[in-house]
Image (cartoon, grey):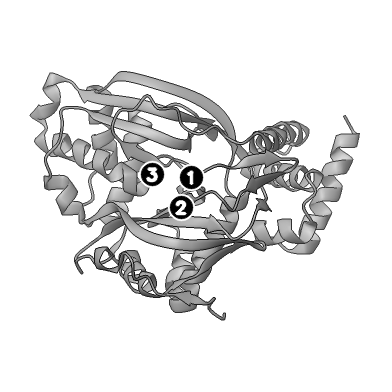
Amino acid sequence: MPRSKQNKITQHESHMNWSANTEILGLVFELVPKADVSIYPQYTTGLHAWFLNQVRAVDPELSAYLHDGESEKPFTISALDGELVSSGKLLHLFASNTHHWYVTALSKRVVTWLAQWVKNLPTEIDLRNAFLRIHSCQIAHSPVTYADLLNSEHEDTIALKFLSPTSFRRKDHHLPLPMPTNVFHSYLRRWNDFSGMPVDQETFLAWVDEHVLITRHQLVSAKVLAGKRGAVTGFTGTIEFGLTKEAAKQPDFYKLFYALGKLAPYCGTGHKTTFGLGQTRLGWSLQATPAVPNVESFLAKRIEDLTDIFKAQRKRTGGVRAEEIAVKWATILARREMGESLQVIAQDMEMPYETVKTYVKLARRALLKL
């Protein structure tokens, strides 16, 4: 695949170097629309695809692993941090505004690729002909190793701020609450996959359930689009975790608890972190997080309502397959109702065009039966 025009970073070049031992890293890109533009509500799927295409151009094997790997994903991306205004069925970006976009790496292999990539960055990001100019790239989260996190100093409590809607999978449903076992299970999965220092999951989570306390919180919930298909109810806001006095009697887990808290800004929280969900920062803050744009909330609600309808109609067949089909039908039909072409939907969802065409017909027929 041909590479887009390149842009050699000079202004911040001296700050874009890190040790060859680095295993974890976070970058932030300053993006400026080249003109006033409109983008589609599920634009994070475009950011996800653009990033993987950048990887594929240099390292196809790594790109395939990031896309198809069965383990935890060793990277995250954020949504656009900046003003997005609902405009009809689209989101509007103004050329006078700057947006920030975060990318993190959770393995040495991805960090190594990033080190080469930032030396010769593209000039822009193309979101279906909405062009965002890359003005700068800087380090957002310090380059560290997993051992650094394990051996660093810490406060008595861990305060976390969830910047984008965050949710967990529990018993085949979404859980929009930061329960300690779910939060730290989320971080432990990444730790066990990438740190080289795996910990027994069952034993550690039993310790978390026994000793981790919620000391304060301020949370709100919102419906949000979930990557390529479906919608979830997620939470944003701030929470603080503390420990019982007895927690220190298991020093290895006590130490890991604080290390996982420091891992949170790099790996994000919950699921769909490679599509902008679960963006997390350290520290307590009462500052309100940006609201989900109205058009995105509307589309998420429509997908959720349609999913419930199609699941109920397919209840007789049951099983995971029936639920997956219901979600696909709902996502395709809702996006088609928003005016998106079947070709674009098929491309975003990585499905054959004819299959998408058939699914939207079946979904419409199913609604007529109500």
Between 284 and 34, the one lying in front of the other is 34
For residue 101, which numbered disc appears in the image? 2
The reply to whether residue 178 is visible in this rendering is no
Q: Position of residue 63 (x, y in %)?
A: 47, 69
Quarter holding residue 59: bottom left
User: Label 2 sits on what residue type?
Assistant: Trp
Q: Position of residue 313 (x, y in %)?
A: 78, 33
User: Label 3 sits on what residue type?
Assistant: Gly
| Mark 1 and mark 2: Cα distance apart in space | 6 Å
For residue 268, which numbered disc appears in the image? 3
Side of 188 relative to 166 (left or right): left
Is 11 located above or below residue 82 in the figure? Answer: below
* Residue position marked by numbered label 1 in the rendering: 81
Q: Secondary structure at mark 3?
A: loop
Dot 1 or dot 2: first in sequence order is 1
| Mark 1 and mark 3: Cα distance apart in space | 15 Å
Residue neighbourhood size for the residue with mark 3, other residues' Cα within 10 Å, grouped as few (<14), some (14–19), many (≥20): many
Is 7 located above or below residue 111 in the figure? Answer: below
* Residue at screen point 42% across, 42% down: 279
* Residue at screen point 28% across, 49% down: 191
Side of 347 relative to 155 (left or right): right
Quarter holding residue 159: top left
Nearest-to-viewer mark from 3 and 2: 2
Residue neighbourhood size for the residue with mark 2, other residues' Cα within 10 Å, grouped as few (<14), some (14–19), many (≥20): some
User: Label 1 sits on what residue type?
Assistant: Asp
Q: What quarter of the picture does the C terminus occupy? A: top right
* Residue at screen point 19% across, 65% down: 21
Q: Position of residue 233 (x, y in %)?
A: 56, 31
Answer whether labels 1 and 3 touch (C-beta < 8 Å): no
